[in-house]
Structure formats: C-alpha cells, structure tokens
Image: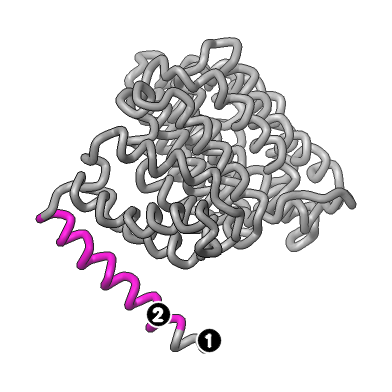
C-alpha cells in the first residue's frame, strides 16, 4: 500500500467513525452497541461450531466501530459491555487486532474502572489490564497499549477503594520495571539482554500510569512506587554525569533522557510522593549541576533540567523544596550570565510564585533578582 493509499484509507476510517458517532447519538448506547457487536457474536458462534475460521478483520472492524461510538457506548447496560470486554482476552493474539483492542480499552477506560463495571464483573479490570500489558510486548501494538495503560491507570486513580486495585499494582510495577531499560535507554545503554521494543514516548506513558495510580495507594506502597520510578533513571544520570559529558556524547544523551523521565514522574506526582521526591532530588543535585556545567550551552539540555526543577517546585511546595532553594538561588545567576537561556528566568519566576507570599522571602529572593537583572542588562 502506497503512502497515498494509506492516507486515503485512514481518512475513510475517520469518516466512518464520525458517521457512526452521529448514528449512535440517535440510537443511544444499548441499541448501538448491540448492533456493533453482532458480527463478533455471529463469528464466535460459527467458530465454536466449526463452521468458520477466526477472521480477525471482522473483529477488528467491529471493535473499531465500538471504539468510535464510546461516548454513547458507555451508556449501554453493564452486562452487555462486560460480555464484550470479557471476551477480548479469549481472542487470538494478532498484532493488528491487539492494536485496536488496546485503543478500544483506552476509549472505555472510565467505564472499565467504574463501580458499576466492578459490580457486574469483579475481575474485569484485571483481565483488561492483563490484555493491555500483553500488547506492550508486541512492537506493532505497543504504542496503543502504552496509551491504554496510562488511561486505565488514570481512570482507576479516580475511584477510591476499587476492589481490583490490589491486583493491579503488581502488574503496573512489572511494566515499570520492564520499561526502564527500554525506549532510548535500549539504544544508548544496551545490556545485551532482551528488552521491550518500546519508544521513549511509550516509556513515559508507563511512568505516568504508575505515578497517577499511586494516588490511591497507602503511604508505604506509594513510597515504594516513587522509588521504583525515580531511582533507576537517577542512578543512570549519576553514571552519565561521572562519564564524558560533552555536547552530543552518549553520556549527554543518557543524562537528558533520564532528566526527562524524572520530569514526567514529578509532574504527575501525588502529594504522598513529596518526601521521597525531595530526598532523591537533593541526592541528585550534584549530578544535575555537573551535567548543567558540561552541556548547559545546549539549550534543550538546559530546558530539560530547568523543567524538572520547575515541576519539583510546583509539585513539592515550599516546605519540601526548601533544601534546594539556597543552591538554586546561588546557581541561577551564574548559569544565566554564562548561557543566557530564558528557561532560567522561568525557573526563577516559579521560585517567586512559591516563596513570594512568605514574609521572610525577601532576603532570599532579592539578591537572586538583582543578580539576574545585572546579568540581563550586562
């Protein structure tokens, strides 16, 4: 299929999806879902009776239609949707089908995590998570599976006391453990062992998933999750910082990748992470400053480190970020005068937003801004 044919094919699918959504708005959820899953029911009966072989294209097309009408489809009776999603793990693992299965699970994530679905089928959420986790193992479906993984965890994080939470946490942590050596890390620091064929975007989706799910965990569980998320990239950052960190070097690329992964975790970190995040960032400060000194002339690298620190200030609040304030106020004028990157000014602005209301902040912030102003005008 040529590129033009692929574009036309995708455009045709999008138009079908729009038409189906309009039709579902007229029929409403129960009738729409009943009609859309009928081909799957008929195929299942025929296969069980030995009259037909499994045709994955029929199932994929039906699931695409179900996904396209999710706005109204989630209003269908719980029993009907449980029958559909309960049948998905029994289907053959065909990569192109797994791709659409994952995106369908993503579209219905809020319903899958709902109390109504849990009451109708107590093990449904665990089965769907297992199905999506298997999609991460297949390069053709990993992109869709990583998105679904995050949306399912995000939906679960909004349901206090979900009965499946205890069974899902080990699956999520297994995915996190498998994601750390994958993505760009597999290219930059090959270990010789088999790793998941994930893009770096997929890795970030998995890190986000575990971070948001931790909102519903007990303190000790959340601390363990925070360390499992942050310690591997920060260890790799320390190793890179101790190496030959020059612009464009492999150590430089590893350092920036690790900083970006930590930024994703810190950006979505729940409050229960704050003590752990503060501790590991204080421990990582020498590595961050060494990388900044070595490759700070590279604007993208400077922005990555400044973004991590900015997210940390916003996420942790004044009390937890206090150990880094004095080093930051000392560092910012120096690096700004040497490198002139605007990201340092945005970072200083975040310090003002966080500490400005404090009556004791003037003695700390005034020298910082005087130095920045001199650097800007000089």
- Image location (x, y in percent) of residue 190: 84, 53
Q: Which residue is mark 2?
A: 9
Q: Is residue 91 left or right of residue 224?
A: left
Residue 309 appears anywhere in the view: no
Q: CA distance from mark 2 to mark 1?
A: 10 Å
Q: Are marks 2 and 1 in contact (CB under 8 Å)?
A: yes
Does the segment drawn in magenta span residue 14?
yes
Q: How is the image coloured?
A: one colour
Residue 14 appears anywhere in the view: yes
- Helix or strand or loop: what does disc 1 sit on? loop
**So how many labels did they put on this image?**
2
Q: Residues within 10 Å of mark 1 (few under 14, many from 20)?
A: few
Residue drawn at point x = 45 percent, y = 17 percent: 163
Q: Is residue 242 left or right of residue 229?
A: right
- Image location (x, y in percent) of residue 74: 26, 41
User: In which quadrant of the rendered view does residue 305 lie?
Assistant: top right
Q: Main secondary structure of the magenta part?
A: helix
Q: Is residue 27 left or right of residue 281?
A: left
- Helix or strand or loop: what does disc 2 sit on? helix
- Image location (x, y in percent) of residue 44: 46, 53
Residue drawn at point x = 59 percent, y = 54 percent: 92
User: In which quadrant of the rendered view does residue 68 lie?
Assistant: bottom left
Front residue of this view, candidates 13 and 39: 39
N-terminal of the pair, mark 2 or mark 1, is 1
User: In which quadrant of the rendered view does residue 18 lie?
Assistant: bottom left
Segment colored magenta: 6-26
Q: Which residue is mark 1?
A: 1
Residue drawn at point x = 31 percent, y = 70 percent: 14
Residue drawn at point x = 51 percent, y = 23 percent: 214
Does the segment drawn in magenta span residue 75?
no
């Amino acid at each position: 299929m040529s590129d033009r044919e692929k574009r036309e094919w995708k455009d045709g699918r999008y138009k079908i999806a729009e038409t189906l959504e309009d039709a579902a708005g007229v029929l409403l959820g129960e009738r729409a879902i009943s009609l859309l899953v009928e081909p799957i029911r008929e195929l299942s009966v025929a296969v069980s009776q030995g009259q037909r072989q499994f045709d994955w294209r029929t199932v994929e097309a039906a699931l695409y239609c179900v996904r396209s009408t999710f706005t109204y489809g989630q209003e269908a009776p719980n029993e009907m949707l449980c029958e559909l999603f309960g049948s998905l793990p029994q289907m053959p693992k065909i990569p192109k089908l797994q791709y659409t299965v994952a995106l369908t699970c993503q579209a219905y994530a809020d319903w899958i995590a709902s109390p109504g679905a849990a009451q109708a089928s107590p093990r449904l959420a665990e089965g769907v998570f297992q199905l999506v986790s298997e999609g991460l193992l297949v390069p053709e479906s990993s992109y869709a599976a990583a998105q679904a993984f995050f949306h399912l965890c995000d939906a679960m994080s909004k349901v206090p006391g979900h009965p499946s939470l205890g069974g899902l946490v080990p699956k999520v942590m297994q995915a996190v453990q498998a994601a750390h050596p994958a993505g760009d890390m597999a290219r930059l620091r090959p270990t010789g062992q088999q790793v998941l064929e994930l893009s770096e975007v997929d890795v970030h989706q998995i890190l986000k998933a575990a971070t948001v799910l931790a909102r519903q965990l007990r303190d000790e569980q959340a601390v363990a999750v925070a360390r499992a998320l942050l310690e591997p990239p920060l260890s790799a950052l320390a190793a890179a910082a101790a190496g030959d960190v020059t612009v464009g070097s492999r150590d430089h690329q590893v350092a920036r990748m690790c900083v970006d992964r930590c930024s994703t975790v810190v950006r979505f970190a729940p409050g229960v992470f704050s003590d752990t995040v503060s501790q590991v960032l204080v421990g990582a400060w020498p590595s961050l400053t060494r990388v900044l000194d070595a490759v700070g002339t590279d604007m993208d690298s400077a922005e990555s480190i400044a973004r991590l620190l900015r997210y940390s200030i916003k996420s942790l609040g004044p009390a937890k970020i206090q150990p880094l304030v004095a080093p930051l106020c000392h560092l910012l004028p120096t690096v700004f005068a040497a490198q002139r990157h605007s990201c340092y000014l945005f970072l200083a602005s975040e310090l003002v937003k966080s500490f400005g209301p404090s009556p004791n902040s003037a003695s700390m912030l005034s020298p910082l801004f005087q130095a920045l102003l001199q650097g800007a005008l000089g």
